[in-house]
Image (cartoon, rainbow, N blue to C red):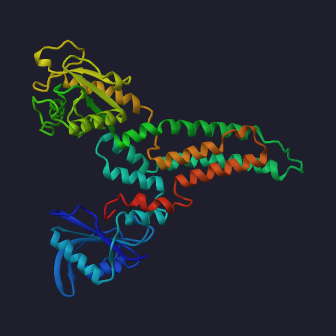
Amino acid sequence: MDLIFAEATPPGRGGVSVVRLSGDRARAVAETLVGSMPLSRHAYFRAVTHEGEPIDQALAMWFAAGASFTGEEVAELHLHGAPVVVRRVGAALLDLGARPADAGEFTRRAFLHGRMDLAEVEGLGDLLVAETESQRKLALRAAGGELARKLAGWRDMLIEAGALVEVSVDFADEDVPDEVPPRVFDLVATLRQALQQELDGSRAAERVRAGFDIAIIGPPNAGKSSFLNRLAKRDVAIVSDRAGTTRDVIELRYDLEGLAVTFLDTAGLRESGDDIEQIGIERAFSRARAADMRIHLSRDGSQVDELWVPGDLVVQSHADLGASAPLAISAVTGQGIGAVLTQIYETLGSKVSDAGLISHERQRSEVISALAALEGADSLPAELLAESLRRANIALDRLLGRIDPDHYLDKIFSSFCIGK
């Protein structure tokens, strides 16, 4: 493969900028710039020069092939964090035959060299963009290989069951009984239960990874935008006594006790002759229907019946002017805001308490395929049962990217940053 390089730290000014190389000549090219680095995994303080011109002073190190992140020979230069230094080193590396890495190319090489499976790659991608504690924990479990270890146990059951079935088929004319041993059906039943349990927890895991949408809905001038501004602790939405001020959906990302939440401030729901406002109202209905939860906010504590879903919250606004509803808030004083957030957290927390490790639609699809392959397995003759076990095993191999991953590799790695 080509020798690639990239800045592994965020671009811009900082204390240190790390430039990473990967490929067969990584050490040799790096030593052209910094001099000898005899031992792998040791850091050396070196002057960085190219064609006799001093560039910087840096810490330099290299990692032997098979003992690096990518599986290839890797070198790193820990430079002073000035963009001009990084640009100059990049120009020198181009002169020496290296090329800039594509997005996610280091991780892609780690996958191609067997250093990571595809589920770990997806977990690493999720970890790089995690915003909350729940997202970090879920991503770290996947990136650390927990899903792969769970799949290894499932595949062991499939292999054992398949071996027992093959014995009953191959030796049907011998002294070995030709009926399928009961142990096979016990294994299949156990495996189906485990797969179904993981599938049942996949939607919750997906919501942890992607976050929850909470729509704030209600009539005009109910205090929806004021509530959003209070949560943001800044003016993200225009507040006015004039009805119909909010005409589009305004979003606020929020870390709610480790859960990623997006609050949606929507247009006031009413009949309107204004074409632009009516578009905003239609968008409000559309986003509210698709949201994971709705806050029905009004001055009188009423709800929007056509959008009501069990689990929604009914909240009365302007509590500082007097309110009687169980949940009442004041965007002016902050009264009741904490109680509403606590109620939201308890409601959403109950939805993710059974979250599993399957958090991507691709992974979910393969688990569904494995379950489908085992459907009705207890009533199949030995030859067809062996084929069902084989198809289930193939689905689990695809989940880890061991079979035919090319059609989704580009999509997965395109979301990674340069240098990872």
Q: Residue 384, image x and y in percent?
A: 75, 47
Residue ID at (43%, 64%): 110
Looking at the image, residue 261 sits to the left or right of residue 407; the answer is: left
Q: Is residue 216 visible?
A: yes
Relative to 170, say whether 62 is above or below: below
The vertical placement of 134 against 415, above or below, is above
Whether residue 237 is situated above or below residue 141 in the rendered picture: above
Image quarter hosting the C terminus: bottom left
Q: Going by the picture, which residue comes out furthest to the bottom? A: 51
Could you tell me if residue 36 is visible in this image?
no
Relative vertical location of residue 219 with respect to residue 149 in this rendering, above or below: above
Residue 199: x and y in percent read: 52, 39
x 35%, y 59%: residue: 416
Observer-nearest of 64 and 261? 261
Residue at 23 percent across and 61 percent down: it is: 10
Question: How many labels were placed on the picture?
Answer: 0
Residue 207 percent coordinates (x, y): 38, 39
